[in-house]
Amino acid sequence: MQRLDGKVALVTGASRGYGRAIAERLARDGAFVVVHHATNADAARQTVTAIHAAGGGAISLAAPLDGSPAGIDALFLRLDRELSAARGSSTVDILVNNAAISPRGTIEETTEALFDEVMNVDAKAPFFMIQKVLPRMPDGGRIVNISSQTSLIAFPGVAAYTMAKGALDRLTLVAAKHLAPRGITVNAVLPGVADTDMNASWLRGNPESFAAASVFSAFKRVADVTDIADIVAFLASYDARWITGQLIDGGGGSGI
Ligand SMILES: NC(=O)c1ccc[n+]([C@@H]2O[C@H](COP(=O)([O-])OP(=O)(O)OC[C@H]3O[C@@H](n4cnc5c(N)ncnc54)[C@H](OP(=O)(O)O)[C@@H]3O)[C@@H](O)[C@H]2O)c1
């Protein structure tokens, strides 16, 4: 018996990076995983194939998020249909709000269009994902928001992203208190830098950038995606039932 047997997890942005690692880990723990993504069908297929190859259950669901509640309603209507076909029910026990974008931009460089896009994808979408998942989530459900160390340590080069992650952290607190009577826990994990596509332009293949990013962690390395996936798997489990409203360091002991 695995600890998430019988549970259904919806992981946004699960085609690549942290989201893929989280999806694979939750599936390994027994959850049936909905591999949400924007448009990269090949990458989503790879996540689903890896889960199936390991003996798990998963389907993919493409739905670019722009924060609009109508778009998220449409996502859930399709999810209802496809989950019911696969599982006989549209219950979602675990929601991981992981999908995000992180375009560079200081305060001076950030246009209104860029600001709105980041806030819509990184802050507004998680808000309405939570609102819309609630009727489908049983008591005792789990919500994990993937935030960032940027909401703790100032990185002026990603100003709008930082602000959006700060908003996500506050959403975590208010949702945790609001949903506690139902036994639903809501926590945020704040990862440090990892070598995902999000950072490819400045990190990948660049030893100097790796060295600079490594100093933030007490372990003096960047994160592996599994470092974060394992934290999320714990928060998603029954064992974490007494933990809610917490902003959990995923930076490998950053700032200690
Ligand atoms: N990587 C880091 O160093 C780092 C550090 C701190 C926090 N984080 C956080 O960790 C999470 C995952 O980051 P990552 O580095 O794994 O990202 P990534 O490699 O860039 O992958 C992004 C994922 O989100 C999906 N996505 C992007 N925009 C979307 C949209 N508008 N609608 C729906 N899905 C969308 C992508 O789908 P497609 O494949 O279809 O495009 C993909 O699955 C994010 O919340 C990020 O802020 C990352």
Image (tube, rainbow, N blue to C red):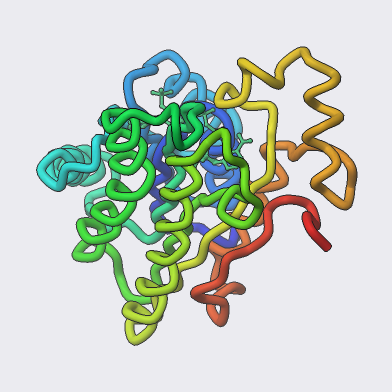
The reply to whether residue 85 is in sight is no
Q: Which residue does the image show at 38% across and 43% down from the upper left?
A: 122
Locate the C terminus by quadrant: bottom right
Q: Residue at the spot x=28%, y=41% of the render?
A: 120
Q: Is residue 4 left or right of residue 196?
A: left
Q: Can residue 214 be seen by looking at this rendering?
A: yes
Q: Is residue 86 left or right of residue 95?
A: left
Residue at the limit of the structure toward the front, as seen here: 108
Q: Is residue 240 left or right of residue 119?
A: right
Q: Give residue 181's quadrant in the image.
A: bottom left
Q: Residue at x 56, y 36 (%)?
A: 55
Task: Please give the count of numbered marks on the rendered protein.
Answer: 0
Counting from the top left corner in percent of width and height, residue 165 is at: 47, 51
Q: Considering only vertical position in the picture, is 64 above or below 83? A: above
Looking at the picture, tell me which residue is in the foreground, 216 or 46. Answer: 216
Residue 170 percent across, percent down from the top left: 42, 66
| Extreme residue toward the bottom, this view | 181
Whole-percent x and y of residue 198? Answer: 55, 26
Which residue is at the front of the view, 163 or 142?
Answer: 163
Q: Nearer the viewer, residue 225 or 5?
A: 225
Give how far across and how far down residue 93 sits, in percent. 37, 61
Give the left or right position of residue 197, taking residue 214 as reference: left
Identify the residue at horizontal 42%, vertical 62% (top origin).
Answer: 143
Q: Is residue 6 above or below residue 228?
A: below
